[in-house]
C-alpha cells in the first residue's frame, strides 16, 4: 500500500529471496514492499534479520536468489549498471577510499557517476560545508572519527543526486549533534523528492522521521505501516510502568496476575529492572510520556496530583500519608538505585486512559502491602511494537 | 502475520535516469587509480627494481668478475630481467591493493557502485596493472644497463619488445587479479611465494629456451607464460641468440591474455557481486 505521496513507486520489491552459499536458511525470505518518491521508508528488524542483505540486493552488491527488485524503474538483477545510476548507498561499515582525502572522496565519487570535474568540485565544496566537514576536508581520512566518517559517507552519497538513497544504520554510534544533523539532512532530502530507505535500531528516534515502517525478522516482513498505525494497532493505547517493592512474602507472578486482572489492562508483563537510573526510558521510549518519580516528597505530590486528575481519592490519601515517599527516599538520597533490592517492574498495556487505572492499580498494590517506587505513564513506542513482534530474546 | 501490505499492482513504472556513458565513467575510475599510482611511483621502483638489479649485479659483476659466468651472460640476462619486471610488477601491483580493497574495509565498493558494468571495473584494474608493469620494464632497462655497464641496443627490435612486455604485463595483472579475488586473505602471502617463485625460475629469464637440453624441463618452461615474454624480449633485442620465433611468442601470449582476462574478470565479478 503506497502512502499518499504521488507518483509510481521508485523502489519495488517482489518476493525477494536471498540464500547465501553454504547456508541452510534464507537470509531474505520472500520480502515485498514499495517506496514512493519523497517517502522515507524504515526497514527495522533485530540483528541478523536480513536488513543489510536486502539493502545489498537493492544496491546491486548482492545477487538475489529469487524474486525481483526495481530501483528507479530498473531491474537491479537485469541491468545493475543502470540501476546504480538511480541510487546511492551509505553502508553499515566505513568504506571510504583511504587513498584519498575527504574532498577527493566526494569529487571522485561524483565523477564515477558522470558528473564533470568542475561540477564535482563545486558540489563537493557545498556538501563538505553542509555536513560540517570543510575544515578537515584535505587531511588524511584515517584522522577522521566515526561520526565524521559517517557524515562524509552521506555527503558522498549525495554528490550524484540519487533518486533513491539507501542508508544502512545511518546514526549508529553517533553523538546527538551528529544524529540531529543527519536526521535534518534526511528530512531535507525528502522535501526534494528523494526516496529514502533506511535501517536503524534507533527506532523511536527514526519514528519521528519515517513515513512508513516495515518490520522484518528472519528475512520476512512482519508488518508494514505508518509508525502511528503500528503503535496504535499492536500495543494498545497506553502503557503504565510500575516499579514496586512487594511485601517480602509476596510472589512476583501472583502480583503480576493481580495487576493483569484489573479492568482495562490488556496485558501485564514483568520487565527487567533498568540498568541505570529508573528514568532511562525517558530517552529510550515513551514519547510524550509522563513520568512520576516518587523518590521524595515532591514525587509524592506529583503522584497525588496525577491521582487527583484520575479521581483516585484513595491514592491521594496514600501519597499524602507519605507511605510511598518514605520508601523512595529511604533508598539513596532520592535517585532510585538501579535494581534496588527486592524491586519489581511491571508493564501494563492498557485499553483505557492510564490515569484512570492508576488508582485501581495502586489500590491492588496497597492491598498486598507493596510499595510503589516509580510510575511511568506513556504511549507505547515503536520499540514496544518491535519487541512485541520480534520478542525479547537477543539474537 | 504475513506481509499484508504487499504493494498493490503498480502504476506505470518511473522513468529511469539514463546512465552516463561507459567511456566517461571508465575514465573516471581509471583516473583515480592513475592518481594513486602516480603517488606511488617510487614504491614501484623499489618493489620491482631491487631484486632484478641485485641479480644482475651478482651474476654479472660478481660472478662474471670471478670468471665463473661468461662475460656475455649479462647481455642474455638483461632482456629476461626486463620481461620479469613487466610481468611480476603487474601481478603484484594489482594483487596487493585488491586484497586490501576487497578486504575488511571494502574500499573498492565506491567504484563498484559506479554505473558501469562490473567487468569494466575489473578491466580498469588490468589496465592500471599493465601500465605499472610497462613502466617497471621501461625503467629497469636503463638501470640494468647502468649496473652491467652495457646493454643490447637494437632500436628496430624495440616495438616488438614493447608489445611482448605489454602482453606480459597484462597477463601478470590477470594472474594477480584472479589470485587476489579468489584466495582467502590469510593464504595470500603463501600463495604468492608458491606461484611467483616457479614463474620466475621456470620463465627462461636466465637462459634461452632452445638451448635447454632436458626435454621435461623444456615442457615445464613451455607451460609458463613468462617463458614467452622472456623469449620475445630477448629475440627482439638479441636476434643472434637462439630464441622462440616472435610469432609463436605473440600467439601464445595473446591466447593466454585472452583466457586469463576472461578468468580474472570472472573471478573479480564473482567476488564483487555475491
Ligand atoms: N556474507 C554472508 N555469508 C553468509 N551469511 C551471511 C552473510 N552476510 C550475512 N549473512 C547472514 O544473513 C543473515 C542476515 O544478515 P544481515 O546482515 O542482512 O542482517 P541485518 O538485519 O543487517 O543485521 P544487523 O542489524 O546486525 O546489521 C544473518 O543470519 C547473517 O548471519
Ligand atoms: Mg545490517
Image (spheres, helix red, strand yellow):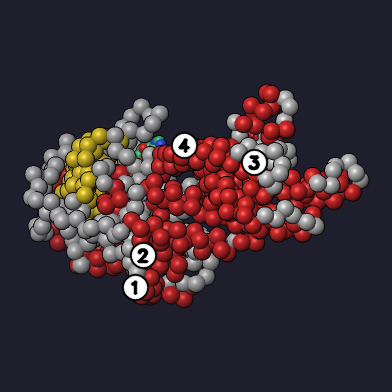
Q: Please indicate whether residue A134 sits to the left or right of residue A313 in the image.
A: right
Which one is closest to the eye, mark 4 or mark 3? 3
Q: Secondary structure at mark 3?
A: helix
Which residue position holds label 4? B259
Q: Which class describes the residues within 10 Å of circle 1: few (<14), some (14-19), or many (20+)?
A: some
Placement of A359 over or under A135, stated as above or below:
above
Q: Give the CA distance from mark 3 to mark 1.
A: 49 Å
Q: Give the CA distance from mark 4 to mark 3.
A: 20 Å
Q: Position of residue A207 (x, y in %)?
A: 24, 56
Which residue position holds label 2? A110
Q: Earlier in the sequence, mark 4 or mark 3?
A: 3
Q: Secondary structure at mark 2?
A: helix
Q: Residue furthest right?
A: B66
Q: In percent of the image, x 91 and y 45: which residue is there?
A: B66
Q: Position of residue B208 (x, y in %)?
A: 71, 38
Front-most of residues A173 and A328: A173
Q: Which mark is residue A119?
A: 1
Q: Is label 1 in contact with label 2 (beta carbons under 8 Å)?
A: yes
Q: Please indicate whether residue B267 sits to the left or right of residue A161 in the image.
A: right
Amino acid at each position: 500500500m503506497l502512502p499518499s505521496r504521488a507518483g509510481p513507486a521508485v523502489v519495488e520489491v517482489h518476493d525477494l529471496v536471498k540464500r547465501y552459499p553454504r547456508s541452510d536458511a534464507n537470509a531474505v525470505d520472500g520480502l515485498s514492499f514499495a517506496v514512493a518518491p519523497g517517502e522515507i521508508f524504515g526497514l527495522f528488524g533485530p540483528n541478523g534479520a536480513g536488513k543489510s542483505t536486502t539493502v545489498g540486493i537493492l544496491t546491486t552488491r548482492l545477487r538475489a536468489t529469487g524474486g525481483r527488485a526495481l530501483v528507479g524503474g530498473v531491474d537491479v538483477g537485469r541491468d545493475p549498471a543502470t540501476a546504480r545510476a538511480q541510487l546511492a548507498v551509505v553502508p553499515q561499515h566505513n568504506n571510504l577510499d583511504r587513498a584519498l582525502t575527504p574532498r577527493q572522496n566526494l569529487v571522485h565519487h561524483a565523477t564515477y557517476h558522470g558528473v564533470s570535474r568542475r561540477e564535482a568540485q563545486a558540489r563537493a565544496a557545498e556538501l563538505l560545508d553542509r555536513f560540517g566537514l570543510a575544515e578537515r576536508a584535505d587531511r588524511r581520512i584515517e584522522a577522521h572519527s566515526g561520526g565524521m566518517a559517517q557524515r562524509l559517507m552521506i555527503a558522498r552519497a549525495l554528490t550524484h543526486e540519487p533518486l533513491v538513497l539507501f542508508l544502512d544504520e545511518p546514526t549508529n554510534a553517533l553523538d546527538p549533534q551528529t544524529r540531529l544533523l543527519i536526521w535534518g539532512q534526511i528530512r531535507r532530502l525528502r522535501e526534494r523528492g528523494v526516496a529514502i530507505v533506511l535501517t536503524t535500531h534507533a527506532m523511536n528516534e527514526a519514528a519521528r522521521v519515517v513515513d512508513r515502517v516495515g518490520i522484518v525478522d528472519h528475512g520476512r516482513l512482519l508488518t508494514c505501516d505508518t509508525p502511528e498505525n503500528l503503535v496504535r494497532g499492536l500495543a494498545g493505547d497506553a502503557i503504565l510502568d510500575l516499579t514496586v517493592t512487594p511485601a517480602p512474602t509476596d510472589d512476583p507472578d501472583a502480583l503480576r496476575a493481580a495487576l493483569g486482572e484489573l479492568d482495562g489492562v490488556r496485558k501485564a508483563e514483568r520487565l527487567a529492572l533498568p540498568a541505570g537510573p529508573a528514568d532511562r526510558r525517558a530517552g529510550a521510549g515513551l514519547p510524550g510520556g509522563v513520568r512520576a518519580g516518587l523518590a521524595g516528597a515532591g514525587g509524592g505530590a506529583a503522584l497525588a496530583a496525577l491521582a487527583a486528575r484520575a479521581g483516585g481519592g484513595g491514592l491521594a490519601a496514600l501519597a499524602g500519608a507519605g507511605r510511598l515517599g518514605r520508601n523512595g527516599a529511604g533508598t539513596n538520597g532520592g535517585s532510585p538505585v538501579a535494581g534496588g533490592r527486592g524491586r519489581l517492574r511491571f508493564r501494563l498495556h492498557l485499553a483505557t486512559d492510564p490515569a484512570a487505572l492508576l488508582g485501581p492499580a495502586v489500590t491492588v498494590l496497597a492491598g498486598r502491602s507493596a510499595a510503589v517506587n516509580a510510575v511511568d505513564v506513556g504511549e507505547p513506542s515503536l520499540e514496544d511494537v518491535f519487541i512485541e513482534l520480534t520478542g525479547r530474546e537477543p539474537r | 502475520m504475513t506481509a499484508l501490505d504487499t504493494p498493490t499492482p503498480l502504476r506505470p513504472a518511473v522513468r529511469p535516469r539514463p546512465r552516463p556513458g561507459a567511456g566517461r565513467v571508465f575514465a573516471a575510475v581509471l583516473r583515480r587509480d592513475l592518481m594513486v599510482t602516480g603517488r606511488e611511483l617510487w614504491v614501484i621502483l623499489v618493489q620491482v627494481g631491487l631484486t632484478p638489479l641485485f641479480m644482475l649485479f651478482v651474476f654479472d659483476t660478481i660472478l662474471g668478475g670471478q670468471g665463473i659466468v661468461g662475460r656475455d651472460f649479462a647481455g642474455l640476462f638483461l632482456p629476461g630481467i626486463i620481461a620479469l619486471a613487466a610481468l611480476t610488477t603487474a601481478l603484484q601491483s594489482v594483487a596487493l591493493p585488491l586484497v586490501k580493497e576487497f578486504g575488511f574495509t571494502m574500499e573498492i565498493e565506491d567504484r563498484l557502485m559506479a554505473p558501469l558494468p562490473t567487468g569494466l571495473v575489473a578491466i580498469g584494474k588490468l589496465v592500471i596493472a599493465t601500465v605499472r608493469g610497462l613502466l617497471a620494464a621501461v625503467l629497469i632497462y636503463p638501470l640494468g644497463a647502468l649496473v652491467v655497464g652495457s646493454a643490447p641496443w637494437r632500436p628496430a627490435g624495440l616495438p616488438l619488445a614493447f608489445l611482448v612486455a605489454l602482453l606480459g604485463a597484462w597477463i601478470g595483472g590477470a594472474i594477480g587479479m584472479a589470485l587476489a579475488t579468489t584466495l582467502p586473505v590469510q593464504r595470500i602471502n603463501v600463495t604468492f611465494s608458491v606461484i611467483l617463485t616457479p614463474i620466475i625460475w621456470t620463465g627462461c629469464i636466465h637462459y634461452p629456451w632452445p638451448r635447454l637440453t632436458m626435454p621435461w624441463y623444456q615442457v615445464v618452461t613451455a607451460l609458463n607464460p613468462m617463458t614467452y615474454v622472456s623469449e620475445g624480449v630477448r629475440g627482439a633485442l638479441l636476434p643472434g641468440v637462439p630464441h622462440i620465433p616472435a610469432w609463436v611468442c605473440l600467439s601464445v601470449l595473446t591466447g593466454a591474455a585472452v583466457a586469463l582476462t576472461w578468468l580474472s574478470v570472472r573471478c573479480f565479478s564473482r567476488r564483487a557481486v555475491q
